Image (cartoon, rainbow, N blue to C red):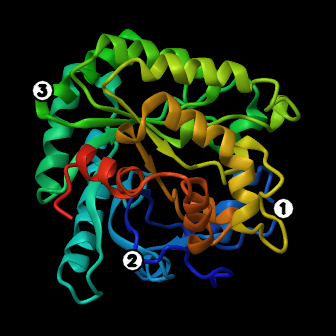
C-alpha cells in the first residue's frame, strides 16, 4: 500500500514488537464470494505478506530498527509429529531473520525476536515443543502466544471462532503454561475485552512469567457488541487497571485498526488520516499508559492485519500524535525501550 502520509518525527527509533508474515494465496485462490466477516476482508487485502512486503513497510519513512514476529499459523510443517508442526513457523521466520541480519536489505533487523505457538493443554508434553522452538530459533526465540479469544456470538470473531471458552483459566492450560518460566520464555496473550478477568488471574498465579497483553485487550464493537463499545469502556478500563497491578504484565498499544472494535475508520475509502485514528484510539491508549506506565507499554503495528484501516506510515504517525505530549525518555520507552527489554533484543 502506498503511503498517504509523510512520516512524523522520522528520526525517532522504533522497534515494532508485533507483526506477522504469511502466504495465503493458495488458500484464497478462486475465492470469489463476498467475505462473510470483516476479518476475511482484511486477509483478502493482504494474502501475501513476506519479507519483501515487510521491508516495503519498514522503509516507508519511520526509523524502524528491528521487529518481533508474532505467530499466525504460517508455514507449519506438513510432515512429522502433529504437535511439532508449529515449529515449522519458527524455522521459516528464523530464515527470514537470517536474511535480514545479512545486511543485504539495509540496517533494519526484521524478526530479531520470534514468538511462536504451542498448545499448553498438552501439559508437561509441551516442554518438548518449547525446546524444539528454541533450537529452531537460532537464538531469536523469545516466547509463545496461544490465543484464548472467544465469544459466544460467532459474529464477533467470525473465522477466528475456534477456541473454547475459559482457556486461560483451565487446569489443562496452566499445567503446560508453568514451563515458560523454567525456560525463560515470555507469553503473549490475545483475548477479548470480556475475557480480561481470566488473564488477571493467570498473571496473579504465575508472577514469574512475563505476560504481554496484545492489542490493549481487544475492545469490542461488532456483532452483539455493535453500538456498545462506549458503554463497555468502563468495564474494560477497570479490568486494565486491575491487570496492571501485576508487575509481570506488559501492554501492547495497537490492534485498534482491526475490525473487532468497530471504529468508523475501518476500511474507509479514502483511508482515515492519522489525526482521525489518534482521536479514535486515544481513550484506550492513554488509559493503558496511565495504568501500566511507559516502562510497561509498547506501540505495535500488528501488520498486515491493521492494514485493513491504514498504511504503515500512517499507523505510526497516529501513535506519534498520541505520544506528542510525552518526554523524550517516555517516547524512547514507548517506541523502542520497553519492546527491547521485554523481548531481550540487541538492537
User: Picture quarter containing residue 296?
Assistant: top left
Nearer to me, 45 or 274:
274
Place of residue 149 in the rendered image (x, y in percent of width and height, measured from the top left): 56, 31
Q: Quadrant of the C terminus?
A: bottom left
Q: Which residue is disc 2 drawn over?
A: 51
Q: Is residue 107 visible?
A: yes
Instruction: Specify few, some or many for label 1: CA neighbours under 10 Å numbering under 14, 14-19, or 20 or more.
Output: few
Q: Residue at x 78, y 37 (%)?
A: 221
Viewer-nearest residue: 25 or 117? 117
Mark closer to the observer (3, 1) = 3
Which secondary structure, mark 3? helix
Horizontal side of 341 relative to 145 (left or right) equals left
Label 2 or label 1, whichever lies nearer to me, is: 2
Quarter of the N terminus within the rendering: bottom right
Nearest the viewer among 110 and 128 is 110
- Is 251 situated left or right of 97 in this image? right
Q: Secondary structure at mark 2?
A: helix
Count of all numbered marks drawn on residues in the image: 3
Can residue 166 be spotted in the picture? no
Question: Decide: marks 2, 3 in contact (CB < 8 A)?
Answer: no
Residue 240 at x, y percent in the picture: 54, 24
Residue identified by numbered label 1? 34
The spot of residue 52 in percent (x, y) is: 43, 83
Q: CA distance from mark 2 to mark 1?
A: 28 Å
**What residue is rendered at 62% in x and 70% in y?**
314
Give the residue number, with chain letter if any, for mark 3: 182
Residue at position x 41%, y 80% from top? 55
Spatial CA distance of label 3 from label 1 is 47 Å
- The answer to which image quadrant residue 286 occupies is top right
- Side (left or right) of 119 relative to 305: left
Q: Earlier in the sequence, mark 3 or mark 1?
A: 1
Amino acid at each position: 500500500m502506498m503511503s498517504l502520509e509523510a512520516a512524523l518525527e522520522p528520526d525517532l527509533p522504533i522497534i515494532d514488537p508485533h507483526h506477522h508474515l504469511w502466504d495465503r494465496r493458495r488458500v484464497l485462490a478462486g475465492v470469489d464470494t463476498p467475505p462473510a466477516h470483516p476479518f476475511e476482508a482484511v486477509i483478502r487485502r493482504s494474502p501475501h505478506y513476506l519479507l519483501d512486503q515487510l521491508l516495503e513497510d519498514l522503509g516507508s519513512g519511520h526509523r524502524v530498527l528491528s521487529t518481533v514476529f508474532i505467530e499466525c499459523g504460517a508455514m507449519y510443517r506438513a510432515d512429522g509429529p502433529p504437535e511439532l508442526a508449529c515449529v515449522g513457523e519458527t524455522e521459516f521466520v528464523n530464515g527470514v531473520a537470517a536474511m535480514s541480519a545479512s545486511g543485504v536489505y539495509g540496517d533494519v533487523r526484521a524478526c530479531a525476536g520470534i514468538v511462536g505457538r504451542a498448545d499448553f493443554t498438552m501439559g508437561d508434553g509441551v516442554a518438548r515443543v518449547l525446546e524444539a522452538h528454541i533450537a529452531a530459533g537460532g537464538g531469536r526465540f523469545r516466547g509463545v502466544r496461544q490465543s484464548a479469544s472467544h465469544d459466544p456470538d460467532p459474529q464477533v470473531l467470525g473465522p477466528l471462532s475456534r477456541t473454547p471458552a475459559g482457556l486461560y483459566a483451565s487446569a489443562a492450560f496452566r499445567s503446560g503454561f508453568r514451563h515458560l518460566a523454567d525456560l525463560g520464555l515470555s507469553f503473549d496473550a490475545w483475548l477479548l475485552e470480556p475475557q480480561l478477568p481470566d488473564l488477571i488471574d493467570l498473571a496473579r498465579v504465575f508472577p514469574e512469567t512475563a505476560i504481554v497483553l496484545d492489542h490493549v485487550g481487544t475492545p469490542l464493537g461488532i456483532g452483539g457488541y455493535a453500538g456498545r463499545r462506549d458503554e463497555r469502556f468502563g468495564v474494560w478500563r477497570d479490568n486494565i487497571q486491575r491487570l496492571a497491578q501485576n508487575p509481570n504484565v506488559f501492554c501492547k498499544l495497537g490492534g485498534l485498526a482491526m475490525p473487532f472494535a468497530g471504529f468508523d475508520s475501518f476500511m474507509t475509502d479514502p483511508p482515515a488520516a492519522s489525526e482521525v485514528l489518534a482521536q479514535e484510539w486515544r481513550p484506550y491508549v492513554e488509559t493503558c499508559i496511565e495504568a501500566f506506565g511507559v516502562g510497561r507499554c509498547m506501540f505495535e503495528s500488528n501488520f498486515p492485519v491493521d492494514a485493513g484501516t491504514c498504511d504503515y506510515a500512517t499507523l505510526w504517525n497516529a501513535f506519534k500524535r498520541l505520544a506528542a505530549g510525552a518526554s523524550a525518555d517516555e517516547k524512547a520507552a514507548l517506541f523502542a525501550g520497553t519492546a527491547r527489554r521485554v523481548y531481550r533484543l540487541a538492537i
